[in-house]
Amino acid sequence: MSAELLAIIVCPACHGELALAEADRPELVCQGCGLAYPVRDGIPVLLVDEARSTR
């Protein structure tokens, strides 16, 4: 995932900053509300219904 893309996208739930985490599978984790959005085939799925809570 490009740094340019990470710089402009935000969490759709709270508009917080997203950080790339690659544990078992890549995902974008919101630094504000803690939702983790999956990245499938290099494309972030920024749907609140698809996110999981990390808290």
Image (spheres, rainbow, N blue to C red):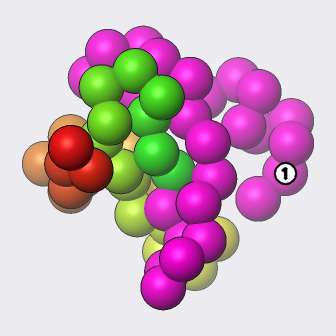
Residue 1 percent across, percent down from the top left: 76, 59
In the image, 51 versus 34, the foreground residue is 34
User: x, y (%) of residue 36?
Assistant: 35, 50
Whether 10 is among the magenta residues is yes
The residue that appears at 48% across and 85% down in the rendered structure is: 24
x, y percent for residue 23: 54, 77
16 vs 51, left or right, is right
Q: Callout 1, which amino acid?
A: Ser
Q: Secondary structure at mark 1?
A: loop
**Up-down relation of residue 41 to residue 39 (above or below):** below
- Please tell me how crowded label 1 is: few (under 14), some (14-19), or many (20+) other residues with Cα within 10 Å: few
Residue at the image position 48 percent from the left and 29 percent from the top: 31
Residue where numbered disc 1 is placed: 2
**Total marks drawn?**
1
6 over 10 or under it: above or below:
below
Q: Which residues are magenta?
A: 1-27
Q: Which residue is outermost to the bottom?
A: 24
